[in-house]
Amino acid sequence: MTSEATATYSSGDVAPKGLKSGALGLVSSVVIGVASVAPAYSLAATLGFIVAFVGLQSPIVVILAFVPMLFTAIGYQELNKADPDCGTTFTWATRAFGPKTGWLGGWGILAADLLVMSSLAQVAGQYVFLLFNADGIGTNPTSGWVLLVGIGWIALMTYICYVGIELSARLQRVLLTIELLMLLVFAIVALAKVGSNNGVAESIDVSWSWFNPFHIDSFSTFVRGLLLMLFIYWGWDSAVAVNEETKDPARTPGRAAVISTVMLVVTYTLVTVAAQSFAGVGDSGIGLGNGDNSGDVLSVLGKAVFGGNGLGSTLSHLLILMVLTSAAASTQTTILPTARTTLSMAKWKAVPSAFGRIHPRFLTPTFSTLLMGGLSIVWTIALLAFNPNQDVLGDTISALGFAVCFYYGFTGIACAFYFRKQVFKSVRNFLFAGLIPLVGGLALFGIAVKAFDYYSTAGNNYSKALFGIQTPILVGIGGLILGVVLMFASWPFFTTFFHRRWGETADPKLLAPDVDAEIAREHYPSG
């Protein structure tokens, strides 16, 4: 390998990983990308808070929050063309900015995925009991039964990830189909009832003014809404993390990432408009923003929209099942990218070689998958069992936004820097490989700065400060600082990786207008 600071490298300088190539097509990749976000679970847990912050302007906030995500997804698409490596941010940040930044990018993925697992486990546990009308347990998030079932879900999803990517993809198709279908039915029935004057006392007609951003009270209010939307959009990058297992690794994962974000904004906008129109906004009745139901909007609205008898009861239970499958699906698709990130880090000789072990039959990461499942269980027990009032759990969800902004933001910026020698050679290069990913990355870093300012205020958090530091800051920023400590601690043991030169650039052929995708794939084998 050459040591010139601006040399061009192919993915062939990293040992083959042994994953099952060609196992996934475009549809399966999109399914993994959307399922990772858990649309139903995310809406159930977040929509009420968004409306409480921004009121009737929630639909336009949903749409505007989509923009930095789309811009970053385009950066993922361009980088994946150059190097379809399952390490994603770790790999690309390493090539563009050097091993230290790359290692921290990989840590950011691990930290974000681990932080969200306890919340997913709790929701899955609660909804199992709600599904069978055991409301006494299902409405009690501190129940030991909820914790036990949540742990069981993590163990089951870890096993499915362990035995094969194809089984994982097939299961995701079923779960996501149920999820999106029920969200669509919910939205249609809610809007139909409002349109026929069969809604509830709080129902209001849909208005175009809901899509006017200038009606938002203040820029601070807008940013607060964006912070929440960041959580419900995050996760689509799982579609790219399985790039080495797709049939067309140079193109399919990037397309899947972009398609996933578009599907999410359409779904979120439709459900937000329908829910807001049916329930209204305010503290009365079932109004969105009501503190009594803001933590779980869909289970409350489902009974009001569908009714409690006959077909309505069945549909209400299907809506509960949908949120359950959403949380379960996201649990699985959160384990997938983390295991593949650490697998890639092992193949790059940035972490112990044990992370690079592949099952000889299933062709999946063994140690990485089991470790992620095990850590998730330990983290879930720590938050749910040793924090009886569970106020810290809510703050850890806020904290993961810092990790998301960090690794998404660096990916967008890395795209512009990696293609820096080609971005001014055409309008297409300038926009899609340069400006758009760069703006997306910088926007996410800007959101992180505003998040730091917001969560530094005691009244904006669920729990009390620890060691004089607000919990989201302690967990979010502290987690990233822990990554820095671990990175420097790893340095003496992985000198080959940490002595890599920084400043690599993409092959100029990749952005040439007449380059054939097959040539690009031949030049950059997936390994």
Image (cartoon, rainbow, N blue to C red):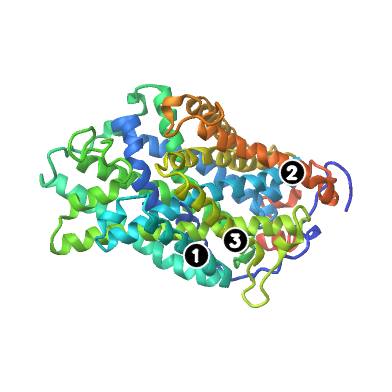
Is 76 or 435 nearer to us in this picture? 76
* Image location of residue 377, percent across then percent down: 52, 57
Amino acid of disc 1? Met
Q: Residues within 10 Å of mark 2 (few under 14, many from 20)?
A: many
Amino acid of disc 2? Met
Q: Residue at x 48, y 67 (%)?
A: 156
Is 477 or 59 nearer to us in this picture? 477
* Residue beneath disc 1: 157
The Cα–Cα distance between marks 2 and 3, rounded to whole angstroms, is 25 Å
Tell me the element at label 1. helix
Amino acid of disc 3? Val
Q: Is residue 189 left or right of residue 114?
A: left
Q: Which circle, 2 or 3, is nearer the viewer?
A: 2
Q: Is residue 340 left or right of residue 146?
A: right
Identify the mark at residue 487; answer none if there is no mark: 2
Q: Which circle, 1 or 3, is nearer the viewer?
A: 1
Q: Quadrant of the C terminus?
A: bottom right
Q: Which is more N-terminal, label 3 or label 1?
A: 1
Please determine whether, in this image, residue 284 is positioned above or below residue 494: above
Q: Residue at x 88, y 44 (%)?
A: 4
- Contact between marks 1 and 3 (CB within 8 A): the answer is no
Q: Which is more N-terminal, label 3 or label 2?
A: 3
Tell me the element at label 2. helix
* Residue beneath disc 3: 242
The Cα–Cα distance between marks 1 and 3, rounded to whole angstroms, is 16 Å
* Image location of residue 381, percent across then percent down: 49, 53
